Amino acid sequence: MSFTYGELKQAIQDYAENDEKLSLFRKNVSGSMTASNQYLAVPSDFLAPFSLSFTDGDGNKTFVDFKDVDYVQTFNPDSTTTGAPRYYAVFDIDNFILGPTPDSSYTSELHYYYRPASLTAGADSGTTWLSENASVAMLYGSLVEAYTFMKGEQDMMQMYFQNFTQALGSLKQLGEAKEVTDEYRTGMVIRPKQ
């Protein structure tokens, strides 16, 4: 089952019998590590890393270990110390920090979880990842809010809430434990389908 934004709005209205209107997440990008610059730009839709690698001038690919920012700064306290990067961490919302600071310009490759586009990005007739993969959670979550606003019957609200909780649990398992691991080093978390 999948919903466009318009279909979801209509389904909520149909279930609630009320027409009042209230106001796999993985990508791969190439980049460039710059000589003597300890920072690497984070993609705007970045959520969590899978892996980071770079290719040297001889074409050799090296994977960089994901660590906590404190670890990277302790490992390389003097940013003027350069070498082939061994570690990286999320420094701030816009940058990774590398340790040691790159001694040369390298082509980098980042595999990462990304933040899906908002449901409203699909407008009334388009689709987004959320409308295609989280349709049940969005529907029942919206119905819980609609019935709360309308002071609907408790048994219906309880059923909607249970369905929402179950759908949310399935989405949680999809992304569980991904924010603090590097897939290259720790392997992919595999869960049985429900």
Image (cartoon, rainbow, N blue to C red):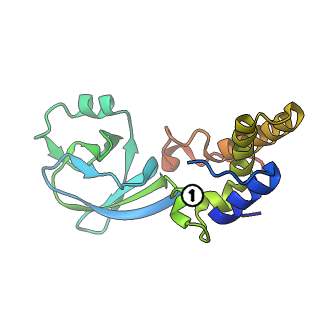
Residue designated by label 1 = 119
Within 10 angstroms of label 1, few (less than 14), some, or many (20 or more) residues? many
Q: Is residue 140 above or below residue 2?
A: above
Q: Position of residue 176 (x, y in %)?
A: 62, 40
Relative to the observer, which residue lies in front, 106 or 28? 28
| Secondary element at image label 1 | helix
Q: Position of residue 72 (x, y in %)?
A: 29, 34
| Residue 60 appears in view | yes
**Residue placed at 68% from the left, 53% from the top?**
134
Q: Is residue 153 above or below residue 102?
A: above
Q: Position of residue 104 (x, y in %)?
A: 16, 57
Residue placed furthest toward the right = 155
**Residue placed at 62% from the left, 71% from the top?**
125
**Residue placed at 61% from the left, 57% from the top?**
130
Q: Is residue 177 above or below residue 47?
A: above
Residue placed furthest toward the bottom = 125
Q: Amino acid at mark 1?
A: Leu
Q: Is residue 39 above or below residue 62?
A: above
Q: Is residue 36 left or right of residue 135?
A: left
Q: Is residue 99 left or right of residue 1?
A: left
